[in-house]
Amino acid sequence: MYLIEWMMWKSILEPAETRKKYEHISTQRVPDIYESDETEALAAARKVVSNTPKSRGPVYTFNDYALEIRCGMWESKRGLITTISAPLIAALILGGVGAADFLNTAIDILYEQNRWSFMHWYISAFLTILVSFVSWLYAKYGLAFSRLELFTSRHLLIRFNRKTQQVHLHRPANCGGIVTLPWAGINASATDKIHFTDDSIGMPLALYWLPRWTGTLHIETAWVGKAANSQAELRHEWEFIRRFMEGGPEGLPRPRITSHFPWPWQAFTPQFEGLTHYFRHSSRIIKIGLVLISPAFLILGLSHWLSLLLCWKPRWPKIIREAGLPGKPIPPLTTLADRPPHIQERLRENAHLWAVRPGQRPAKKPRAARRPAKADNRCTTAEASFTDELHRSDGHSR
């Protein structure tokens, strides 16, 4: 599922009028990033974070110059959109076939019996109009969502090229397209405690490039590999990538190479990525509940597999496939000029949202002093008040 990538790309291109229209109901804002933040993040990305580098994949290419891993934020949720889209598409196809069948029967009756079967003509016309109208609505409003899982690239990919010191992202055009980025500007979510929190559990490794390195006036982000069961798994994944790019494949454990062919198990295993630790330590009641809802996992897995079958294998441009080989050219980094004119205009308009602020991040303001305790407004008698005052005075005298 490419929902997160699609939403991020839409937000990057969102017109200022639309953003102002909904800013009063939006609780999220783009966080401010300072030059000091960028410097610290780049330095942290070069440090050793694990002594046991390991990639959990899925890895599609691993050789002397290239490392290619599956990318994407919600691969484990893939199948939800297919579960909704597939029955609708099937109903439209059956409706069209039914309209054609009634029309064929009406024509046969007309020629063989020389009479008009108005019932067949009416049903055929009704189905034709209904299917045409629903198809128009679906093409206008629903197809864009279906294409987040259907009739698109089978997977998002990230390709690390050690020879050219470049990183390539393979995404559909509606999610940002294929881009080439410099390794020197990469930041990772598993580098230090500032960016790495407990919230990262259950999420893949996040890599990002700030606008100074992307050349397109906005931040580029990619989520790499499987969702993590622990913080250590993200550190192992990042260390594997870092050592490959800076030292080569020597000394690294060879990962299991995954095929691009859509095998059925590739649709069922992602559902449990990042949840192994949770399942292992869950209570008996939760385990019984998981058994009861297992048919839902089966339906989601079958929809995931159908999604893979109805998509095509992602293919890199020739210049990226051959990059790193002797005598082959180095792919140019993606720049603003590589985007269509209307996209360039929108990126320029929104460039201020992602701009890095100069200088150091301001120091945090000290927390305000806690408010004094509220006065006791309970109604008391004169005798009780005198007794309290006497006890206080006695305490001071002691």
Image (cartoon, rainbow, N blue to C red):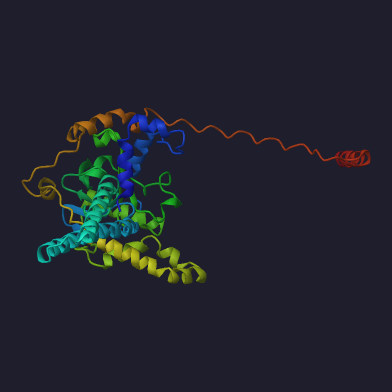
Q: Is residue 133 above or below residue 30?
A: below
Give percent across and percent down for residue 285: 51, 70
Residue 160 visible here: yes
User: Considering depth in this image, is 333 or 73 the residue closer to the camera?
Assistant: 73
Q: Is residue 66 above or below residue 354?
A: below
Q: How many marks?
A: 0
The residue drawn where x is 22% and y is 32% is 342
In this view, 69 is above or below 364 = below
Q: Position of residue 8 (x, y in %)?
A: 33, 42
Q: Quadrant of residue 29?
A: top left
Position of residue 317 in the picture relative to residue 80 (left or right): left
Q: Quadrant of the C terminus?
A: top right
Q: Residue at x 77, y 36 (%)?
A: 375
Front residue of 308/211: it is 308
Q: Is residue 284 left or right of residue 346?
A: right
Please provide percent x and percent y for residue 332: 15, 38
Query: In the image, what residue occupies the spot 15% across and 62% down?
Result: 115
Residue 163 in the image, given as x and y percentages of width and height:
16, 47
Name the image quarter holding residue 185: top left
Residue furthest toward the left?
A: 327
Residue at position x 34%, y 68% in the image: 298
Q: Is residue 58 among what the camera can see?
A: no
Judging depth in this view, the residue of 112 and 85 nearest the camera is: 112
